[in-house]
Image (cartoon, grey):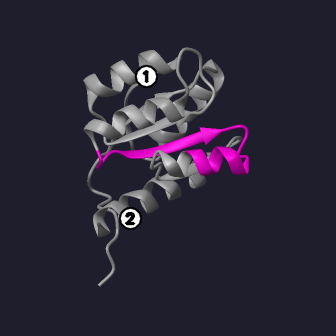
Amino acid sequence: MSVLPDSSVKRTVFIADDDDTARGLLKSVLQASGLNVVGDAADGKQALSEAKRLLPDVVCLDIDMPLMSGLDVLARLRVDNSKLIALIITASPTAQNVREAIQVKADGVIAKPFNQAKIKNEIDRAVARKLLK
């Protein structure tokens, strides 16, 4: 039996990226994929605070942000929520960044520029992996 993500569940997503254009584009892509974007932040400190308050199903975090990196935000979120689905989105998908993302238990790394199919596919794959655990 294959375990597939339940497409009838409208997952909540939180976005953190210091680039206004990237954040807006990601929000549009996620909404067009049927996801419910519940909030966003332009820096890591705000991202941590808002994600803890909103308790989304999924977070999309840029690595390079002011005040706190997306990797640091994810490490802190993981302390309270191991079931959180976390995607790291970066313009610099270097081996070092990927290793660090794995260390903080990111569920996927997406290189910028991204498209709707790639984002939706990564979220679906991450959900399926979480359901198998």
Numbered mark located on residue 19 in the image = none
**Which amino acid, by three-letter code, is at mark 1?**
Ala
Q: Residue at x 71, y 51 (%)?
A: 95
Q: Can I make out residue 27 in this image?
A: no
Q: Which secondary structure, mark 2?
A: helix
The image quadrant where one finds the N terminus is bottom left
Q: Is residue 54 left or right of residue 48?
A: left
**Percent x, y of residue 71:** 52, 35
Vertical comparison of 114 with 21: above or below:
below
Vertical comparison of 4 with 63: above or below:
below
Q: Which residue position is annotated with label 2?
A: 129
Q: Residue at x 51, y 58 (%)?
A: 121
Tell me the crowding category of disc 1: few under 14, some 14 to 19, or many 20 or more residues within 10 angstroms, Cα based: many
**Which amino acid, by three-letter code, is at mark 2?**
Arg
Q: Is residue 5 left or right of residue 124?
A: left
**Percent x, y of residue 131:** 29, 64
Is 49 or 26 nearer to us in this picture?
Answer: 49
Q: Is residue 92 left or right of residue 22?
A: right
Q: Which residues are magenta?
A: 82-100
**Percent x, y of residue 79:** 30, 38
Q: Residue at x 71, y 41 (%)?
A: 113
Vertical comparison of 132 with 36: above or below:
below
The CA distance from mark 1 to mark 2 is: 24 Å
The image quadrant where one finds the C terminus is bottom left
Q: Which secondary structure, mark 1?
A: helix
